[in-house]
Amino acid sequence: MERIIVLDRVPENHPEVSKEDAAAAWSHCIACTPAFDKDPDRYIAIGIDDKGRQVELVVIRKDGGVWLIIHAQTSPQHDIKSRLGFGRRRS
């Protein structure tokens, strides 16, 4: 069974995103990619929280099915959206 843990610093750094918001966004992830430049177990993602907001996330995969959310903010930054394929025009 997977567990989600949100660091206390997430709402401290971004008070508009509660721990519950961050966990909900990860549970409703709409785009995710490994952040190989940092750590193969680190992911950047965008998810939708229970308020319907897009939330940018940085999550680390730990042993035993644990996901540790170390960063969450809304609205996602342009570079994160671009890296995850948002905003690309289709021909």
Image (cartoon, rainbow, N blue to C red):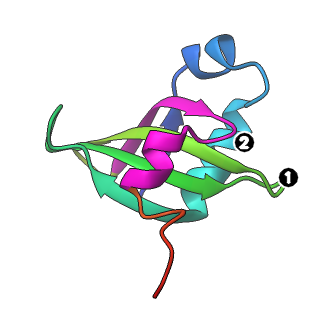
What is the number of the mark on residue 21? Answer: 2
Identity, as a three-letter code, of the amino acid under mark 1: Lys
Residue 80 location (% of width, % of height): 45, 44
Does 27 sit above or below residue 71?
Answer: below
- Gap in Å between the C-alphas at discs 2 and 1? 8 Å
* Image quarter of the N terminus: bottom left
Q: Which residue is mark 1?
A: 51
Image point (58%, 59%), residue name: 27
Mark 2 residue crowding within 10 angstroms, few (<14) / some (14–19) / many (20+): many
Report whether residue 31 is seen: yes
- Where residue 36 sits, quadrant-wise, is top left
Identity, as a three-letter code, of the amino acid under mark 2: Asp
Left/right placement of residue 60 relative to residue 12 reads left
The number of callouts visible is: 2
- Callout 1: SS: loop
Report whether residue 1 is seen: no
What is the number of the mark on residue 1? Answer: none
Task: Compare residues 86 and 31 and report the one nearer the observer.
Answer: 86
Left/right placement of residue 50 relative to residue 56 reads right
Mark 1 residue crowding within 10 angstroms, few (<14) / some (14–19) / many (20+): few
Q: Is 82 contained in the magenta span? A: yes
Q: Which stretch did the figure color magenta?
A: 66-83
Task: Compare residues 5 and 21 and report the one nearer the observer.
Answer: 21
- Callout 2: SS: helix
Does 12 sit above or below residue 39?
Answer: above
Q: Are marks 2 and 1 in contact (CB under 8 Å)?
A: yes
